[in-house]
Image: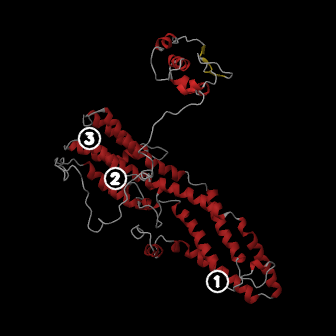
Amino acid sequence: NADVNNANVSALGKLLWRWKGSIWKAVYAELLLFLAAYGFCSLIYHVYLDDIQQRYFEAICVFFAKYADFVPLTFMLGFYVSVVISRWWDMFNNIGWIDLPALYIANHIHGNDEQSRLIRRNLIRHLLFYQVLAYRDISVVVRERFPTLETCIAAGYITADELNKFRGIGSRFPQYWTPIGWVMSGLRRAYREGRIHSPIALQDLQNRVLDFRGNLGTLLGYDWVPIPLLYSQVVSLSVRIYFIIAILGRQNLVQAIDDKYIDPINIYFPIMTTMQFVFYVGWLKVAEALLNPFGSDDDDLEINWLLDRNLEVGYMIIEERDEIALTRDTFWSESVIYPLYSEDTVKQAHNPMVGSAVNMKLRTNSTVMVPRLIDDEAEYLARSSSIFSLAPLASIQRRLSRLGNGVGPEEGGENDSRRDSRKISSPNPPSTIHSPLPRRTSTATHNTGELHVVVEEEEDPEWRKKW
């Protein structure tokens, strides 16, 4: 990551000039095998075959070259790698960090006495023991580190008495739930003893424990239900068979049935085919390396380091420490804060968040705000169901009355009494309301199920102007 922090030529050189985890390390063995097979066939064709045999060989090569593209290599590889990478990223997001449970335990379970420390440290230790149990079953490197549960006693994840109780349960299935049950029991004990001060805090702690358990449970599920073997076999075989066909299909031919299969330049080394091999096989190697990120490949997750880190950090977080004294910050008396930069970075480009429409050139000195006119109020009432679902029935009647009396929707005056007298009584309004608008040939209706409004009007320029 440090080598490619800038997108320049030197970063590209640093990116390519690597061996561990590189494409060169991933494909070199198969590439050498492919080139050896290609060279062997080319040698037989050019040296040991007579003219008639060469024609038969050329016919076979043309056949393979003609139909090699029938393999949908790009589509299958692209979809397969996409599925594997999304699965790998979700695995990484669920590897299980002890920080959050430890911080909640330290925050909700207080006390410097020995009993409080015992509760906090036992809770962390049992959570870590659950993590070791899970990784022993899905990671080869962790299994090699802890081949038996007795090694967990020496590593400090469990005591001999706890291991006896663990084995005394005698379940036929993996007992991942046992250490989680111990943690829940320890939380209840702390609550009974008054070390957790509220049931809300207890519930909060239990949720954090269940989240930690859910993260590792997700990894167990991924290990139990991998990508279907059939799909992995199809993709792997497609890539290998494609280049087996290319051993003959990409040969440098002297003659051929179709001249397009003859290279105008006599090149005995397959330059473009070699590049294609590196790209496609390297693409497949990405998926094969990330299919199980808990192994010992170069790009696999460092699970042993994670266990070591969680063991130390978890115990350090839960230790009760003196509170930090409240002090005034550097900007206490400053009304405007000026952030500081180092001398090397103060002149670097600074691009603040500015909206894309901020710098638009608009006419602002003579802007007049006007209401949006509706061409046909009757059609508006007929088509807009929101009027009848949101506005009270009385307000609809007042709206119709104002239109009929030449008064705008927000105006008042002497017609208020008339409008008020036409209010619809609730809860049993009339089923039909007629608007006192000037008549027009067209009629618009709206039926809401409870209210049927008939609005009739004629084309009256004066009414439209008033409205």
Which structural element holds mark 1?
loop
Q: Nearer the viewer, residue 220 or 393?
A: 393
Per the image, the residue denoted by label 1 is 269
| Label 2–label 3 contact, CB within 8 A | no
Horizontal side of 257 relative to 20 (left or right) equals right
CA gap, disc 1 to disc 2? Answer: 59 Å
Q: At 49% from the left edge and 33% from the top edge, which residue is drawn?
A: 371
Disc 1 or disc 3, which is closer to the eye? 1
Q: Amino acid at mark 2?
A: Tyr
The numbered mark, 2 or 3, whose residue comes first in the sequence reads 3
CA gap, disc 1 to disc 3? Answer: 71 Å
Asked if residue 201 is positioned above or below residue 173 in the image, the reply reads above
Can the viewer see residue 50 in this picture? yes
Q: At 78% from the left edge and 73% from the top edge, which residue is drawn?
A: 63
The numbered mark, 1 or 2, whose residue comes first in the sequence reads 2
| Label 1–label 3 contact, CB within 8 A | no
Q: Amino acid at mark 1?
A: Phe
Q: Amino acid at mark 3?
A: Ile
Mark number for residue 109? 3
Mark number for residue 398? none
The numbered mark, 1 or 3, whose residue comes first in the sequence reads 3
Asked if residue 48 is positioned above or below residue 466 in the image, the reply reads below
Horizontal side of 419 relative to 274 (left or right) equals left
Can the viewer see residue 167 in this picture? no
Name the image quarter holding the N terminus.
bottom left
Q: Residues within 10 Å of mark 1 (few under 14, many from 20)?
A: some
Asked if residue 115 is positioned above or below residue 383 in the image, the reply reads below
Q: At 62% from the left edge and 80% from the top edge, which residue is drawn?
A: 271
Mark number for residue 157? 2
Task: Estimate the x, y position of residue 89 in percent, counting from the top left.
Answer: 48, 56
